[in-house]
Image (cartoon, rainbow, N blue to C red):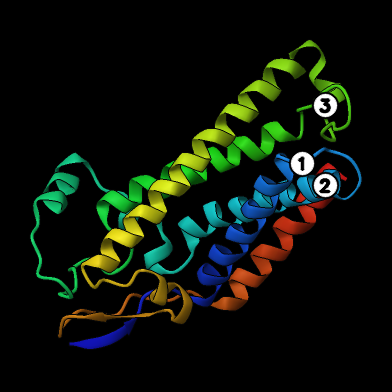
Amino acid sequence: MKKIKVWDGPIRLFHWALVTAFSLSLYSAFQDKFGIYADMHLYAGVTVLGLVAWRIVWGFIGSETARFTSFIKGPRAIRAYMREKRKPGEPYPWVGHNPLGALSVTAMLTLLLVQSILGLFATDDMLFSGPFSSKAGGSAGLITEIHETIGYILMGLVALHILFIIGYAARRVNLIAPMIAGTKRAEEGTPAPKMASPLLALALGAGIAAAVWLIIF
């Protein structure tokens, strides 16, 4: 057994920043939308949009384990993974996301992107309106309903995600520690994935943040 680096710093920072931003947007969604809660919901949602946009681009040019081509697999690979039996504590052969987890990652990124964009056009016709709600016209009500529905779906996906983490923990497979430290235990001979430059991630993040801010505000 040996330890290898599986998650780069930018991915780990993205993950926990997304957890924070989504939590704030979720909390503020159930508060009266005026004053601090309106601002919290708006800026948390815009932050989610920027983070997801960065993650999508990083999924094509980033580190090996961050690239979609490294973890999005077909039905055959998913079935093989689900049939695989391992002893408690025995490491799995996959380095980054497993084939089943890839479905969760893809679904959450897609829904978060759609959710944050729809939020820009949503309004409750009373206390809160997204920056582009006036451009939605008569569709604003429908957009708001879809926005709310996707919010509940995301809550379910997050709950399922947490349950899987607990399930792996019960089998003595820690999924949280690698997302903090960046390393995990692997079988001897497992090659360490290639990591992209953090400066590239920083430049990409700055560019996307500036574009999102200029477009929305």
- The image shows residue 27, relative to residue 19, as above or below, that is above
Callout 2 crowding tier (Cα within 10 Å): few <14, some 14–19, many ≥20: some
Question: In the rendered structure, which disc, 3 or 2, sits on the residue that comes first in sequence?
Answer: 2
Q: Tell me the element at label 1.
A: loop
- Residue position for label 2: 37
Q: Tell me the element at label 2.
A: helix
Q: Residue 50, how many percent across, how many down?
A: 68, 53
- Residue position for label 3: 133
Query: Quick check: can you spot residue 66?
Result: yes
Q: Residue 28, how many percent across, how many down?
A: 74, 46
Q: Residue at x 63, y 29 (%)?
A: 148
Residues at circles 3 and 2 in contact by the CB criterion of under 8 Å: no
Residues at circles 3 and 1 in contact by the CB criterion of under 8 Å: no
The amino acid at mark 3 is Ser
Q: Residue at x 27, y 69 (%)?
A: 95
The amino acid at mark 2 is Tyr
Q: Residue 77, how many percent across, how many down?
A: 17, 48
**Which mark is on residue 31?**
1
Question: In the rendered structure, which disc, 1 or 2, sits on the residue that comes first in sequence?
Answer: 1
Structural distance between the alpha carbons of marks 3 and 2: 18 Å
Q: Residue 211, how many percent across, how many down?
A: 77, 52
Q: Residue at x 66, y 40 (%)?
A: 116
- The image shows residue 92, relative to residue 53, as above or below, that is below
